[in-house]
Amino acid sequence: MKLFIGAFLFLMCGGLSSYAQSTPATQWRITQPSWTELHEKQFGEFVSRLGEAVERRECGKVDTCLQSTANPYYTSDPRGLKYFADCADLPYYLRGYFAWKNGLPFSVISEVKPNLSPGEDPKNVKDVRYSPLGNYVTKRYDVFVKKGVFKNTYPNALEVLNDVVPGLTFSASFRMMGNLDQELFSDFYPVKINRTAIRPGTVIYDPNGHVAVIYKVADDGRIFYIDAHPDNSLTMGMFTPKFVRSNPAQGAGFKNFRPLALIEAKLDSSGSYAGGKIIAATNSQLSQYGVEQFYGTQPDPMGSWSKGKFTVQGQQTNFYDYVRLSLMQGEVHIDPLNDMAQLTDDICVSLKDRVDAVEAARTSGIYLKPHPARLPLNIYGTDGEWEAYATPSRDARLKVAFIDLLAQTKSNIERYKKRDPALRYNGGNLAADLFSIYAQKAQACQFSYTTTNGLTVKMNLEAARQRLFAMSFDPYHCIENRWGARIEQEIAACTDDQNKRAWYEQEKWLRYQPERRYDVRMDLSLEELTGPLPGVGLETPPDIDIVGYLKSQR
């Protein structure tokens, strides 16, 4: 999420002098000049081990995971490695770390510029993380051994992982389709929707500014990922509509790293390749390159990406079902009871992760500060205290997850009523059985938060659903309002003054909106925040009443 601030020039002009004296333990030696399918498989296994550790809650941060037995390379790490990555850094950090440990070449985009409409002023694009037409590469940073007259210069792995990766990589690096073959190549290419292409190590890019790395594809076609956050925490989740589709130029969806090769290099006396240049595989060389995720299996004849159709075995479906059914092992089928269990489990994980995010605001004391006179320019894409402690994007994904839960449930019940042969259910009352699973899962999903005065409030998933649109994303609000407190004894601990309470009331329009919009200004004052504006807020919250719906269908 961070902004690019001239890190490329800093590095090229001799920065990072603290790493000038590298040691054999920190040297990046290239002993295998080309990434092969075996390397890709091993990289996927490396990511899988980390993801499984996060899923089992054996670790919850980039540093603790990489310094655990989940990382097979940890014991060979030299002192000084920071083990730090946010969401955009994580894919690069894991790829770079693996490349270093296996003597492979590495390269990253170091600068991008936005694609523009004909005649458009570049000043119109104020943030390349959210450029409407995506970006293109203007500079790259390559990691390879430089040949010298008397002595070769080996890259310093600590410099690359501690400073280059976090300094150069940001979500704008993912905001490109990857369909162009050119010297300044994109780091990723779009993939076909199958189990060979979508695998551990595949990246999912959400054009709303978030990036995740797949660590598991289950037999039922569900995709599980890990993602990092500004506080270095690692969380896991399941691919659902919380990852949106968008204009193909923005590059949303599934992508793999382009395999790299070091060419024209020579072996030196240490057994490392030196000199040469790094190139990437072209699209024609990539067997799993594909763009159907952008345009559909039946593209729109007029070229509209949003009107393309997705079909599986002759049956039209939406994109998200298409992905799941295409990755499913064995006969294509839908298990509505399993769907309910998995979707509620995924929501539970997000709620527990939110506990940590709000707790960080409590322990930092940010909620005790006066409320700023205006909201950020855009509440979803900003920096500073708001980025570190606010939760608008996290909360929006949570709202989308509840919306999707209701939508999937309605879809499965309609399939049941129509006797869809793809639906696997042998019971006699689908709505009642779905309600039973939801109630069981909602009750089992227990978590708690600490109030302003240090008390513990216990909640479960259903309580969170009922409070969802009352939960404040604003880091300057008291912790009780951050959790949508409705019980008098609970809200009594809130220390918010009259001004903050007014902000909480007026921000309800923004809380009602599940869509993350980066193309509108939101730097409103309290006096200006009097109701929904175009693209900013909704009059009423969307329907997430899964309980009411299922009761009506029993």
Image (cartoon, grey):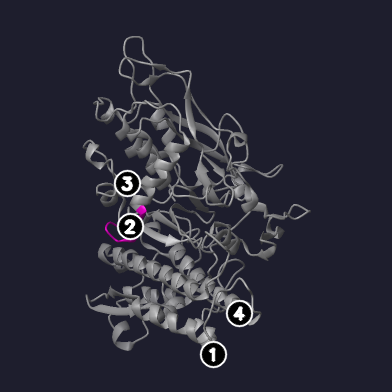
| Residue under pointer 1 | 554
Q: Residue at x 52, y 49 (%)?
A: 129
Magenta-span inclusion, residue 11: no
Task: Give the alpha-carbon distance from disc 3 to disc 1, as whole Å.
Answer: 50 Å
Q: Which comes sooner in the sequence, label 1 or label 4?
A: 4
Q: Residue at x 35, y 65 (%)?
A: 353
- The kind of residue tagged 3 is Phe
Q: Residue 44 location, x and y as percent?
A: 41, 46
Q: Residue at x 43, y 70 (%)?
A: 347
| Marks 2, 1: nearer the viewer | 1
The image quadrant of residue 31 is top left
Say if residue 423 shows up in the picture. Answer: yes
Indicate the quadrant containing the C terminus: top left, top right, bottom left or bottom right.
bottom right
CB contact under 8 Å: marks 3 and 2: no
Q: Nearer the viewer, residue 255 or 489?
A: 255
| Residue under pointer 4 | 416
Q: Which comes sooner in the sequence, label 3 or label 1?
A: 3
Task: Give the alpha-carbon distance from disc 2 to disc 1, as whole Å.
Answer: 38 Å
| Residue under pointer 2 | 54
The magenta region covers 51-60
| Marks 1, 4: nearer the viewer | 4
CB contact under 8 Å: marks 2 and 4: no
Q: Which comes sooner in the sequence, label 2 or label 1?
A: 2
Q: Nearer the viewer, residue 553 or 159?
A: 553
Magenta-span inclusion, residue 55: yes
The image quadrant of residue 341 is bottom left
